[in-house]
Amino acid sequence: EIVMTQSPATLSVSPGERATLSCRASQSVSSNLVWYQQKLGQAPRLLISGASTRATGIPARFSGSGSGTEFTLTISSLQSEDFAVYYCQQYNTWPYSFGQGTKLEIK
Amino acid sequence: QVQLVQSGAEVKKPGSSVKVSCKSSGDTFRSSTINWVRQAPGQGLEWMGRITPILGIENYVQKFQGRVTITADTATSTAYMELTSLRSEDTGVYYCARGQPWLVYWGQGTLVTVSS
């Protein structure tokens, strides 16, 4: 099973600033990676698939990059609604697996 | 627009079973893949398994193998997840989600509490 590791566990950033979240796979997953956002009490929401393709309706301030084992989610200018928990998920190999999440909090 | 509506919260005794339903509306249920994901209190997301009704194929994560059964009723566009031999560690929110290989549409979640 592929283990996904996210860092940091918690990231404190001020509104308007840039946030960079990392996700590492225990073995190569090519570009078969997605990012989700989860707000408190809600189901996750798909942000990015294929490591870098924004899902429908996702603002351009969200961008993803990386391939192989190292991936990054960047939020260019944080808005108040962006403070949430973010998960990466690989779909290269079944069983698919999630990272443990990064909590993005207001500084 | 696809919507997934799950059954309500459950409180179960250790050793018992729970069956959660997930009714899909919108486009074709048979050709979709329904996944089940668990989230323990304050914890991350954990894949449990999936089913693709049109193929009649289920896949389970090894951790849950033998305790979980995922089924689908194409007549009612409803998927089910049954988890047996419940223990306290099974307490959490259980989500169904449609999509393959990523999860696009999510149910609202069903809280399952296992307590004596």
Image: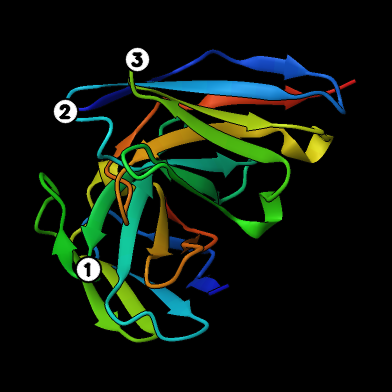
Q: Residue furthest right?
A: B116
Chain under label 3? Answer: B
Q: How many other residues sit within 10 Å of disc 1, few (<14), some (14-19) or many (≥20)?
A: many
Disc 1 designates what residue? A50
Residue mark closest to the camera, 2 vs 1: 2
A47 vs B64, nearest the viewer: B64
User: Image point 62% across, 22% down: which residue?
Assistant: B19
Regarding mark 2 in the picture, which secondary structure is present there? loop
SS type, badge 3? loop
For the residue marked with disc 2, what is the amino acid? Asp
B100 horizontally vs A1: left or right? left
Q: Secondary structure at mark 1?
A: loop
Q: Residue at x 22, y 48 (%)?
A: A79
Q: CA distance from mark 1 to mark 3?
A: 32 Å
Of the two numbered discs 2 and 3 on the same chain, state the one appearing first in sequence.
Answer: 2
Label for residue B76?
3
Mark 2 vs mark 3: tell me if same chain.
Answer: yes
Q: Report whether mark 2 lies on the same chain as mark 1.
A: no
Residue drawn at (39%, 47%) of the image:
A84
Q: CA distance from mark 2 to mark 1?
A: 24 Å
Q: Which residue is mark 2?
A: B27
Q: Is residue A107 visible?
A: no
